[in-house]
Image (cartoon, coloured by chain):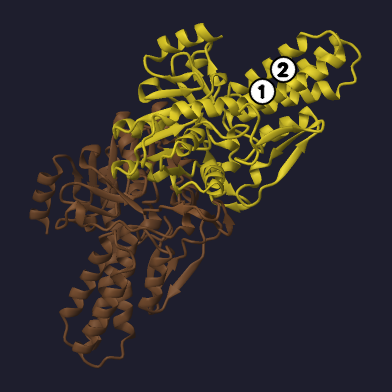
Chain colours: A brown, B yellow
Amino acid sequence: MAMPNKGDYLTTIAWENDGVKMIDQTKLPESLEYITCKNYMDIADAIKKLAIRGAPAIGVAAAMGLALCANNSTCNNKAKMMEELGLAYDILLKTRPTAINLKWGLDKVFEEAKKYDRVDDIKKNTILEAIKMSHDDITTNKLLGKFGSDLINDGEVVMTHCNAGALATVSYGTALGVIRSAMEAGKKISVIATETRPVMQGSRLTAFELVQDGIDVSLIPDTAVGYLMSNKMIDKVVVGADRILKSGHVFNKIGTYQVALLAKVHNIPFYVAAPLSTFDMDSNKEDIVIEERSADEVVKIGEKRIAPVGVRIFNPAFDVTSPELIAGIITEKGVIYPPYELNLRSLFKSDK
Amino acid sequence: MAMPNKGDYLTTIAWENDGVKMIDQTKLPESLEYITCKNYMDIADAIKKLAIRGAPAIGVAAAMGLALCANNSTCNNKAKMMEELGLAYDILLKTRPTAINLKWGLDKVFEEAKKYDRVDDIKKNTILEAIKMSHDDITTNKLLGKFGSDLINDGEVVMTHCNAGALATVSYGTALGVIRSAMEAGKKISVIATETRPVMQGSRLTAFELVQDGIDVSLIPDTAVGYLMSNKMIDKVVVGADRILKSGHVFNKIGTYQVALLAKVHNIPFYVAAPLSTFDMDSNKEDIVIEERSADEVVKIGEKRIAPVGVRIFNPAFDVTSPELIAGIITEKGVIYPPYELNLRSLFKSDK
């Protein structure tokens, strides 16, 4: 179970021959293409342009980026190599501000590097650590998927927003991992995917990977969420997360907050599925930077301009969902229920 | 005030030399092009493909379509001509099912035709009636704009969804008429326009006409509505309507319901601006057909495919907003407040 079963589901990212091979998600759904990153700057570019995205996936990508930096290094002593790794760490950390997994992945590899004195040992062990993280990600997703599966009943319709699937992780997915696990348990599940403007991760990625798996999926515009909920066409909502605070506040793709609020008003349970690496037990809500992305994401689709020249654009990439809107947070250690502050504190006290 | 002031705002549709000239809204915002409809089938096609859209605009278009049918007719007696008009009536009525104004426009011209015995009088008077309706539409919008303007305070940020502007009417607009009127009254107003997936009337049309007018407008993805509301970036919401029932239920562009619900939860007043021709005092909510439109609107933008082959699409064009979410309905007779059933009954008793 620790090794990726490549036959089953898409593998988003993998270490391969001194490079990092990943699906170029900017090309989906038109074509399934791979790129190979040969150094950490390639990884930083891939994260910035969303060739790879999704909190767990960019955590592993950043970890592999740091391992690439070590592997490519010509430094002949530990001090110089740690300096070089520190530089790469900063550059990789700055690629995207909101998801915590980026820092988590970088810290893991950086701490591993610190343990060894010889340059060759640092190279070997940072690579091993990054590869292990990619395998652990799949194990984690299958575990949390199994816990989440118990929340979904046979025959239910599950809505998801953005992509928290195989393509947001190394494989299998978090929110879509819950759906896969429910299906593997023999339940018949239908999925409603929101398009997720502006980057269209719902249309391009979630619909793509569910169609590939033969899972029953319907795509709706983000404007139709209220319509479906008020017409009793949705039984549960499951989404991923980019950062979860100790208070239970969830930072996730723009639009998550309104989906959660609409679910609350319509009495539809709203769940968040995320590994423990997504939790930030130190920060407060006000500390977190919400990334604002380029106007081009809104004014253009491909090369086609869909908004007039001269219009101002506001394009925040994430929003915050309050704990009172969340029925449960599905992790690899089980489902966390309210009160989140209390229950998360006990979980992390016993676990970390 | 009864005549369109062409210098001021875009004119969407006008009778011109035995034809009907209209802006081809499928070409916006890239280019401002006009098409001329020579017969009622051209009008029906223009409505179906959304070259012209917006409840008041398609009401006038259908009326002009029926007048074109009369004008082009070679029938030499009233009975035959009325039969031909009846056929055109049915074809025009079926172009789109949800907006009531289509039927209202057709009925006005058809009733006018009935009044005359001579074929030439029918031709002349149906054309005059259709032209009068186009002038009245502007008068109506300016009146309702003025009533609505009193609800908007200096310096406020007003959100609107879809396009209820000059382009949804003959000119000036309903929801955007309220904003124009507030600005003409010397108030400084900023507008937030939602993109309005899938057809993007917010990006393509609302942003376009407000940029043309030099009105301060920012465009946001439909997913960012909750974010802006929770961050206190919106003071009021004003939208148009395709059909308003005697109960106060408002049928409007998909996404309106969730904007209204989000506004309610965030204590932001949500107003609907619509002429009396948009009211349907006969039907119940269950009687109204919600048009479901082509999957292509969701899977493609221009020629670019944004969703995978094989995904199912659900694309309802309208939704229903309950009266309890609506702070007021702005009409040319003043603002109607709850209880809507009672207040609408008195209004229509005294008026129609």
Q: Is residue B186 visible?
A: yes
Instruction: Give the distance between the C-alpha atoms of the residues marked 1 and 2, in whole angstroms.
Output: 9 Å
**Front position in the image: B169 or B131:** B131
Q: Position of residue A247 (x, y in %)?
A: 16, 47
Lateral position of residue A150 relative to residue A298, left or right: left
Q: Which residue is mark 1?
A: B133
Q: Which residue is mark 2?
A: B109
Quadrant of res B130:
top right
Q: Position of residue B287 (x, y in %)?
A: 53, 15
Pinpoint the chain carrying mark 1.
Answer: B
Quadrant of res A79:
bottom left
Count neighbours of disc 2 (C-alpha within 10 A) and say few if under 14, some if 14 to 19, many if 20 or more.
Answer: many
Image: A192 above or below B40? below
Q: Is residue A238 visible?
A: no
Verify CB contact (< 8 Å) between mark 1 and mark 2: yes
**Front position in the image: B184 or A272:** B184
Viewer-nearest of discs 1 and 2: 1
Quadrant (top left, top right, bottom left, bottom right) of the C terminus of chain B: top right
